[in-house]
Amino acid sequence: MAGDHKGKAPPQQPGIYALATPAGRSAVAVLRLSGLGVKAAVEALVGHLPAPRRAVLADLSDRPGDGTIGEVVDRGLCLWFPAPHSYTGEDVAEFHLHGGRATVAAMTEMLGRRGLRAAAPGEFTRRAFHNGKMDLTQAEAIADLVDAETSGQRRQALRQMEGGLGAQFEGWRQRLIAAMALTEAVLDFADEELPAGVEERVARELLLLRSDISSFLGVQGRGERLREGVRVAILGPPNAGKSSLLNVLAQRDAAIVSTVAGTTRDVIEVHLDLGGVPAILADTAGLRRAADALEAEGVRRATAWAGGADLKILVGAVGDWTALYTPEVRSVVSPGIIVVGNKSDLGPVPPVWDGLPVLPVSVRSGEGLEALIERLTDAVGRLAGESEAPQLTRARHREGLFDCIGAIDRALEGGEAELRAEELRIAAQALGRLTGRIDVEDVLDALFRTFCIGK
Ligand SMILES: Nc1nc2c(ncn2[C@@H]2O[C@H](COP(=O)(O)OP(=O)(O)O)[C@@H](O)[C@H]2O)c(=O)[nH]1
Ligand SMILES: [Mg+2]
């Protein structure tokens, strides 16, 4: 359990090693070691134990302990991080080798002979978590940082790694535990004189806590969108230029463009970086009354994707403006939709459609594209913009908070003090699972499986 060993050196687990750099040929390969046998391996390979946290350059060769010295495998750097002042909290060492396959293979073979084994994905971070080096939200942030593709994602992961989100959850949990203690006091001292108004005080505090958590949930969704990407649907009648628009925005030919109406059947997704925010842009089948079953399926998929989208772009085209006035098109319109009048090279674009301003664009000439990208970046930023305050970044966090609120509500409904105390315990557990303070093995398995080996 996290935090069990804070202060004293934790017992070390069997030694593991892994490349911290990608496998294959490279200038430098970093081999990371943790756990039992690491100290002996460093002494054997370097010839002595280096000063902690200082890089030493050494001829690396095995010294089996019988006085002999094996062949030099590489001349590389070694860093020694004795427990508990290391990433995992165990004895850790790093070898910076020349990044050849044979070099790395010779090193790992030597380590294998010394009883170390290859690490499983996320095993280093898992040990760090178990040794109280970080809470679960911070471990999640490390996974997110490794996966971050845009600047916004990177900064959000970095902030979460600093522990703000975990501290927020833990603060609420402490308040719940205090309320639980008071409720239990009512139980224990039922026959005696209790200070007046204890139950009222607990109820007041619970209402306050409930409103803090729900207002936190209310402004959320942004952090998750920033982590996972804002979903943007390109919608409109056939032949309006939806696929062409996706292609220019993606700067590649992801979707087939054709004068034949109904060419796009499946939803095609491309990933974009809009001002640091990741966006998943989807091209969809043209919305009209379908001519056949295949097209009908395309329209169904388009409408379904639109239903789950965070943002919609409706594309109409000069010369075929009436195609926008169909029940199929109207059914996908919702507040915040961006209306684009494409093919402005062919003629004037109507300034409004259904009371909404129309952005004139020509995918062919490039007119209006910059303004559209600006509009999109702005809208996406409002949906998933960064914030200095801690943010929920995973569905797991949101679900945990809902569980917590549900239990608080049940406690507030009144009834036996015993039952109320039990609900508060459930509420506190829901928060404890978020930071990893209690039984989280299943959460751990799911999280660390997504790590790369060597992290
Ligand atoms: N004149 C003109 N033609 C365009 C423009 N954008 C797309 N097209 C053409 O319109 C046709 C339909 O385009 P496509 O992207 O397949 O439309 P979709 O059915 O909405 O996906 C193709 O022949 C495109 O070359 C534009 O801005 N101006
Ligand atoms: Mg198309």
Image (cartoon, rainbow, N blue to C red):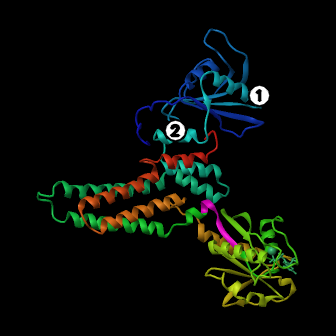
| Pick the front one: 265 or 213 | 265
Residue 64 percent across, percent down from the top left: 63, 14
| Pick the front one: 390 or 19 | 19
**Total count of labels:** 2
Residue 342 percent across, percent down from the top left: 80, 81
- Seen in the image, is 369 located left or right of residue 437? right
Compared with 177, 328 (above or below) is below
- Seen in the image, is 160 located left or right of residue 61? left
Q: Give the mark nearest the N terminus, 2 or 1.
A: 1
Which quadrant holds residue 350?
bottom right
Residue 92 percent across, percent down from the top left: 56, 31
Q: Which mark is residue 127?
A: 2
Residue range in magenta is: 226-233
Identify which residue is drawn at 61% across, 18% down: 44
Label 1 CB less than 8 angstroms from ligand 2: no
Identify which residue is drawn at 42% across, 41% down: 3
Q: Which mark is residue 102?
A: 1
Q: Secondary structure at mark 2?
A: helix
Q: Which mark is residue 361?
A: none
Q: Residue furthest front?
A: 293
Quarter in which the N terminus is drawn: top left
Compared with 308, 91 (above or below) is above
